Image (cartoon, rainbow, N blue to C red):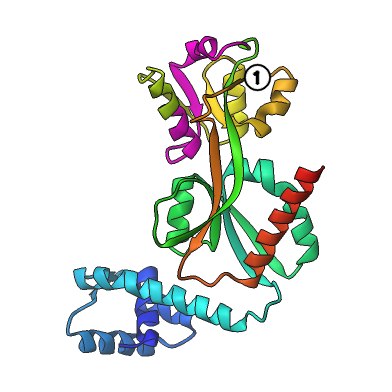
Amino acid sequence: MDAADLKVFEAVARLGGMSRAASELNTVQSNVTARVRQLEQDLGTTLFERHARGVSLTPAGQRLLPYAGRIRQLLGEARRAALDDGTPRGPLVVGCLETTVALRLAPALVGFAADYPEVDLSLQTGTSQELVAAVLARNIEGAFVCGPVSEPELVQELAFAEELVLIAPPGRGGDLDGALDLACKIAVLRSGCSYRQRLEEFLAHNGLTQLRCLEFGTLEAIYAAVEAGLALSLLPRALVTPLERQGRLSLHALHERSGWVETLFIRRRDHQPSSALKAFKARVAASESDAAAA
């Protein structure tokens, strides 16, 4: 069994057929079939069930597939590392919370695109839970998530510290207890959102546990729901202060223990960061310094 055999096996399993795998691998079907049969012979077990529609994995093939996928990813990383001469270039996929994109990354993105035109940067937004899973699966090179994160396979670096505030409809200014009258409903992003978890923990600490969650896909939808008096939510102060000034929302500081959250940058411990990622992190840090000095 070698890496070339596993590459063929993974392609057949992913595409569901020998001919489709041969087309992707730019070879003939007979070569793919021979490789798979040789691998099955070396292992002493059948990996595929053949049928009229193509092939499907046997239980042994299902057990082998995750390892084949990991080897394919590692070979790709090894190739990129060998070709990385210190000049930022090529694809770079970074995960971000939607709030981080809106609040922290916009200035850095403009400068980074201008300074490093050879980098093909993609931002993948999601919840902290989704982004941690994506980094662990090697689908993205790193991500900005809410801390704490308990994963020994990850390197964690403090990126930002955010003050969280309870947001309520306009006219609910004043003490926090008055705003909590609306806490039968909360406007949140989907499950896995760290701010959602913080809000539920904060309300439970204040004796409010029978909550109805209104799930939305965007921050603007959350703003609209809170402004309309449908629910409360929890978001970084710097993000929603402009809406308070516009009279759309009222903001309420939390107790010191629950009012602050750390945004971490995470990456796999066994992954050598690319020159593109190093340059991107440096640009984000420089933008933060510029903002703090302004």
Q: Is residue 258 visible?
A: yes
**211 relative to 116 in the view: left or right:** left
Location of residue 45 by image quarter: bottom left
Q: How many marks?
A: 1
Q: Amino acid at mark 1?
A: Leu
In the image, residue 112 above or below residue 220: below
Q: Which of the pair 228/251 is nearer the observer?
A: 251
Residue 149 rendering spot, x and y as whole percentages:
44, 49
Location of residue 280 by image quarter: bottom right
**10 relative to 276 in the view: left or right:** left
Say which residue label 1 marks: 249
The residue positioned 76% from the left and 60% from the top of the image is 113
In the image, residue 241 above or below residue 37: above
**68 relative to 144 in the view: left or right:** left
Q: Mark 1: which secondary structure?
A: loop
Q: Which residues are magenta?
A: 174-200
The residue positioned 35% from the left and 85% from the top of the image is 5
Query: Which quadrant would the C terminus be assigned to in this image?
Result: top right
Q: Which of the pair 59/95 is nearer the observer?
A: 95
Location of residue 94 by image quarter: bottom right
Mark 1, Cα crowd under 10 Å, few <14 / some 14-19 / many 20+, is many
Residue 213 rendering spot, x and y as whole percentages:
43, 25
Most extreme residue toward the left is 44
The residue positioned 47% from the left and 82% from the top of the image is 25
The residue positioned 51% from the left and 11% from the top of the image is 177
Residue 244 is covered by the magenta coloring: no
Q: Is residue 51 visible?
A: no
Residue 218 rendering spot, x and y as whole percentages:
58, 35
Residue 106 rendering spot, x and y as whole percentages:
72, 47
Q: Which of the pair 214/99 is nearer the observer?
A: 99
